[in-house]
Image: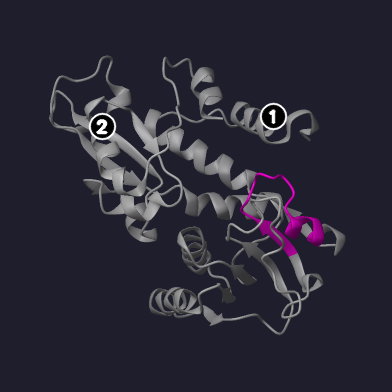
Amino acid sequence: MQNAGIAALGLDWRYLAFDVRPEELKAALEGARAMRFIGLNLTVPHKLLMHDLVDERDETARTWGAVNTVRFEARDATGEWTPLGAFATPPETDEILARGFNTDADAIVRALREDVAVEPRGARVLLLGAGGAGRTAALRLAAEGVAELWLVNRTREKAERVAAEIRARHPAVAVAVGYPREPVDLLLNATSRGLRPADGSPLDEAAFPLREAAAVYDMIYRPAETPLLRAAREAGCRAANGLGMLLYQGTKALEIWTGRPAPVAEMRRALEANIYGDTAP
């Protein structure tokens, strides 16, 4: 996806994947800084860790408490901090700043609107998972003005902490821990259950029948259809996987690095070909 976007913009850049152990994340950040990387993306479990490692945080990172995108910057001729991607050649300076951003929060809201026709404001939402992705989604949905939010997590204490944070920051939102006893507009899965072939559904249907959800969104995008999504479609729910969220967090990251509009259509085509192969819609 990113390399397709980079090519469409005519940039002589490459987007590469690296496996980094959590205890080596700080060293990896310093290595990328030393090698004058344009920026970084991070996935679990690094988003919360990187929040405390970057030099500066954009408002998105400060608001959601997690960093999934880093942009490296140096001072230009006027002394202003400028993205490294804007320099014709890497600047000859040891003073390189790592600025953190969060592009996940806005991406999930856009994907919900486009992929399952859910407008968060006033909606009733059941959210599965209160970890990094779940916490960000819960806070973003609360900020959008959902009417009611139910949080379910394997460790109840973690869900209680997120609920307390929402009550403090968004007191108008009715938030509870546990399954609702009434229908919801959206069931959102932010857990990792469904990634592996042997996984079942993250939903306890004895506690909440799937037919009680008008729409189901699973943040997992590979496999393209998880057990939860398969069951949701059989139950007649509007349903979508996390491809849209992945796309929009990525397009925003590319815009942060380049300062230019992302070629969304080209990036979507590359992503769909990678996820769906010959069965791409």
Viewport quadrant of the N terminus? top right
> Is there any visible trace of residue 221 in the rendered image?
yes
In the image, residue 24 above or below residue 278: below
Q: Amino acid at mark 2?
A: Gly
Q: Is residue 146 left or right of residue 167?
A: right
- Badge 2: few (under 14), some or many (20 or more) residues near its Cα, within 10 Å? few
What residue did someone put label 1 on? 273
Q: Is residue 147 magenta?
A: no
| Label at residue 31 | 2
> Is there any visible trace of residue 58 in the rendered image?
no
Q: Residue 70, located in which quarter of the rendered image?
A: top left
Q: Amino acid at mark 1?
A: Ala
| Residue closest to the far front | 198
Pick the front one: 181 or 111 = 181
- Whole-number angstrom distance, CA of label 2 to CA of label 1: 32 Å
Q: Position of residue 27 (x, y in %)?
A: 25, 39
Pick the front one: 263 or 223 = 223
Q: Residue 181, located in which quarter of the rendered image?
A: bottom right
Viewport quadrant of the C terminus? top right
Magenta-highlighted residues: 215-232
What residue is shown at x 59% (from left), y 30% (from top)?
267
Q: Is residue 227 magenta?
A: yes
Q: Secondary structure at mark 2?
A: helix
What residue is shown at x 15% (from left), y 19% (from top)?
92
Lower position in the chain sequence, tag 2 or tag 1: 2
Q: Secondary structure at mark 1?
A: helix
In the image, residue 195 above or below residue 236: above
